[in-house]
Image: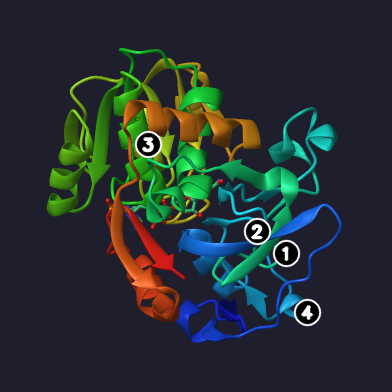
Amino acid sequence: MLAVIAARFDPDDPLAALDVAEQPEPEVPDGWVLVEMRAASLNHHDLWSLRGVGLRAEQLPMILGCDGAGVDPDGNEVILHAVIGDPDAGHGDETLDPRRSLLSERHPGTLAERVAVPRRNLVPKPPALSWEEAACLPTAWLTAYRMLFTRADLRPGDTVLVQGAGGGVATALIALARGAGLRVWATSRDEAKRAKAIELGAHAVFTTGERLPERVDAVMETVGRATWSHSLKSLRPGGAIVVAGATSGNNPPADLAQVFFLQREVIGSTMGTRDELVHLVSFCDAAGIRPLIDEVRPLADARAGMARLRDGDVFGKIVLTM
Ligand SMILES: NC(=O)c1ccc[n+]([C@@H]2O[C@H](COP(=O)([O-])OP(=O)(O)OC[C@H]3O[C@@H](n4cnc5c(N)ncnc54)[C@H](OP(=O)(O)O)[C@@H]3O)[C@@H](O)[C@H]2O)c1
């Protein structure tokens, strides 16, 4: 079967580590099922894998991809939950299982014609969602859902700041927060992306680092170093930064006085549970919210899609179809 793989690692030039190649059919352990893929979406995670983050050389070649939707052996249309973990080992939450992994970290990923997943990782796809839309939900959109509705303590009418408006997680945050009745402010370095953020549902947009008219109740942070200081300063006393990524760098100055003196909280967030994915799918279905898709390409064109993700030249998700 055709698949997109990390054939090697290249920390500086991740695309040099990527191949689109024939791979053996997946093994299907007991309790797992084989899914015929229809669509999968790209994530920054795929670029980290190509750089060698989170994988060991002996795991190569590794099929990339966390997100996807397809057809199970009974003919059901399904969305794939990307977290492979045991809820019992994480106090009822598989994201807290110390041994949890994402598809493409320990087991082959979704950028392939077929993928094996545990049966519990299948979630029904509502007919109203297209294959392409469904394939956007399990990683970036699930991450955004948990950041807003599980990790932050927000209620309708609160103001939330979303940093780096163009990213997959950021566009999901804007659409979901608007749909849930929050006041949504977003930043971007790029004027065209700021205009698109307004179209997507942001009430107001700002250039990266710009002083805000007032402090916000919560900040959704996935940019990291480039926006961290602004995130801290933009937060009201007692407010929370929920952080799920650090695209521009992991180690900004911590600025601890900004944290303790105004009693701000810094909350980590990663992916989400199967139950949260079920609720996200239901929320999108009921509220008519749809993932913003920047571009759809065939699986064989993965390299071009990955190049756009590397260059930060996207607004929304890039989807591959099988
Ligand atoms: N924890 C989890 O479960 C989880 C799940 C999904 C993603 N993530 C992480 O979340 C992060 C976001 O991923 P993504 O795929 O949504 O988006 P992304 O492609 O990594 O980009 C996010 C945004 O960051 C901004 N940005 C990047 N470099 C910047 C810089 N030097 N200065 C200022 N802004 C910069 C850009 O915004 P503008 O161009 O609009 O300014 C860009 O749109 C990644 O690090 C990813 O690994 C984590």
Identify the disc placed on residue 173.
Answer: 3
Identity, as a three-letter code, of the amino acid under mark 2: Leu
What is the secondary structure assignment of the residue under circle 3? helix
- Image coordinates of residue 282 in percent, x first then y, are 47, 30
Mark 3 and mark 1: Cα distance apart in space: 28 Å
Mark 4 and mark 3: Cα distance apart in space: 36 Å
What is the secondary structure assignment of the residue under circle 2? loop
Please report the residue visible at 48 percent of the width from the left and 61 percent of the height from the top. 40
The mark that comes first in sequence, 2 or 3, is: 2
Identity, as a three-letter code, of the amino acid under mark 1: His
Q: Colour scheme in the image?
A: rainbow
Q: Residues within 10 Å of mark 4 (few under 14, many from 20)?
A: few
The residue where tag 1 is placed is 107
The mark that comes first in sequence, 2 or 4, is: 4
The reply to whether discs 1 and 2 touch (Cβ–Cβ < 8 Å) is yes
Mark 2 and mark 3: Cα distance apart in space: 22 Å
Mark 1 and mark 4: Cα distance apart in space: 13 Å
Q: Residues within 10 Å of mark 3 (few under 14, many from 20)?
A: many
The residue where tag 4 is placed is 58
Identity, as a three-letter code, of the amino acid under mark 3: Leu
Q: Closer to the camera, 216 or 203?
A: 203
- Image coordinates of residue 247 in percent, x first then y, are 44, 55
Q: Closer to the camera, 145 or 284?
A: 284
Identity, as a three-letter code, of the amino acid under mark 4: Glu
The residue where tag 2 is placed is 103
Q: Residues within 10 Å of mark 1 (few under 14, many from 20)?
A: some
